[in-house]
Each structure stands twice: as structure tokens, then as C-alpha cells.
């Protein structure tokens, strides 16, 4: 029978910290954007190819499933977060727990937006010429980075196993 000490090995602590950090960074950046919505709505040019904007997306990635009931996307995201949390506590690999934590924190950041605004606040706008990538937020950055790390984790752990 495993106890609390075993359940919270160093890799798991890394994963939980990653989830908390991703969630906090996402919420802080969105709060800044929402508090300055009028300024961001007009767009702020940071450098050629990158603007800060204010937009809301009621769908998921690239606006897919736009118009779906907010609560259905919220329920789906929460179910996925529960599954990812189970996975986080089942693995002993630091890279995998970090990845799961980043995905969970990002997903929960977008869940909070769906509950508060019925849509997700997006503000990062990258473009080339007149072609813009769909705007996104820090939660999306953490989810995509987490998925990328999860895909790379087998190679990372084969090179450098981290023990608790």
C-alpha cells in the first residue's frame, strides 16, 4: 500500500508545480488583457509579425466547435484533466509529469474562462504579411508545449533518467 510520501515523489511534485505555474501564468496574463481590453482590442504592435490583441473564442483550437454549448466544452476539458491527473500520478518520469502538469494547468486556465465568459480570452497574434495565425493564449502555449514534451519524453528519459 503506497503512502503520501511515495505518491508525492519528486517527479510528481514537478508535475503538480507545473500545473499550478501554468494555471497562474495563464490567469495573470488574461487578467492583464481583460483589464486593458479597450487598448488590446485595437491591437498593440510588439514587433513585425506579432501583435497583442483582445479576442474571445467560443470554440476550441482554431475556433473548431465554435457555437457548441460552453458547458459541453467545459465538461469535456474537465474529464480530460481528470484522466491526465490520473496519468500524472501513475508515471515516475519527470519529463512526463512535467508535460501532464503543463497540459492540465493550461486546460484548467481555459476552463475558468469558459465558466466566467462562456468563451476563452485570446491575445497572442502572430502573422506574416496579412496572413494571421488564429490568436491564442498562454494556456494554449502550455497545452501544446506539454503535448510536445509528452511526445519527446521517451527519448528524454532514455538519455537521462531522473530518480526521486
Image (cartoon, grey):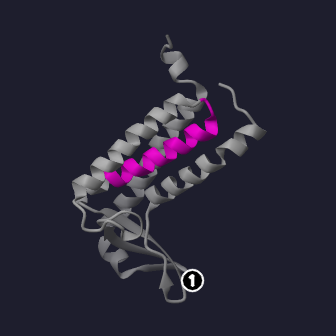
Q: Nearer the viewer, residue 112 or 74?
A: 74
Q: Main secondary structure of the magenta part?
A: helix
Q: Position of residue 141 (x, y in %)?
A: 50, 59
In the image, the segment drawn in magenta is 92-111
User: Which residue is at 45% across, 52% downward?
Assistant: 25
**Residue 50 percent coordinates (x, y):** 52, 77
Residue at the disc numbered 1: 48
- Mark 1 packing: few (<14 Cα in 10 Å), some, or many (20+)? few
The image shows residue 39, relative to residue 2, as above or below, that is below
Q: Please state the horizontal and vertical placement of residue 145, each as a whole percent of the image.
A: 56, 54
Q: Is residue 24 visible?
A: no
- Residue 107 falls within the magenta-colored stretch: yes
Q: Is residue 70 left or right of residue 85?
A: left
From the viewer's side, name the closer residue of 95 and 18. 95
- Please tell me in which quadrant of the rendered image residue 135 appears: bottom left
Q: In the rendered view of the protein, which quadrant contains the C terminus?
A: top right
Residue 159 magenta-highlighted: no
- Look at 34% across and 72% down and name the residue there: 55
Seen from this angle, which residue lies furthest top? 1
Q: Secondary structure at mark 1?
A: loop
Amino acid at each position: 500500500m503506497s503512502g503520501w510520501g511515495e505518491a508525492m515523489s519528486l517527479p510528481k511534485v514537478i508535475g503538480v508545480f507545473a500545473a499550478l505555474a501554468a494555471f497562474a501564468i495563464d490567469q495573470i496574463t488574461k487578467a492583464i488583457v481583460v483589464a486593458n481590453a479597450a487598448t488590446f482590442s485595437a491591437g498593440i504592435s510588439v514587433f513585425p509579425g506579432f501583435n497583442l490583441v483582445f479576442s474571445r473564442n467560443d470554440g476550441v483550437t482554431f475556433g473548431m466547435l465554435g457555437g457548441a454549448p460552453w458547458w459541453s466544452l467545459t465538461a469535456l476539458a474537465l474529464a480530460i484533466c481528470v484522466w491526465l491527473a490520473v496519468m500524472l500520478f501513475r508515471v515516475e518520469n519527470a519529463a512526463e509529469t512535467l508535460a501532464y502538469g503543463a497540459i492540465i494547468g493550461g486546460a484548467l486556465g481555459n476552463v475558468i474562462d469558459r465558466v466566467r465568459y462562456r468563451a476563452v480570452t485570446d491575445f497572442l497574434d502572430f502573422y506574416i504579411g496579412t496572413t494571421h495565425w488564429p490568436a491564442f493564449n498562454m494556456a494554449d502555449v502550455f497545452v501544446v508545449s506539454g503535448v510536445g514534451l509528452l511526445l519527446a519524453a521517451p527519448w528524454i528519459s532514455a538519455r537521462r533518467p531522473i530518480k526521486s
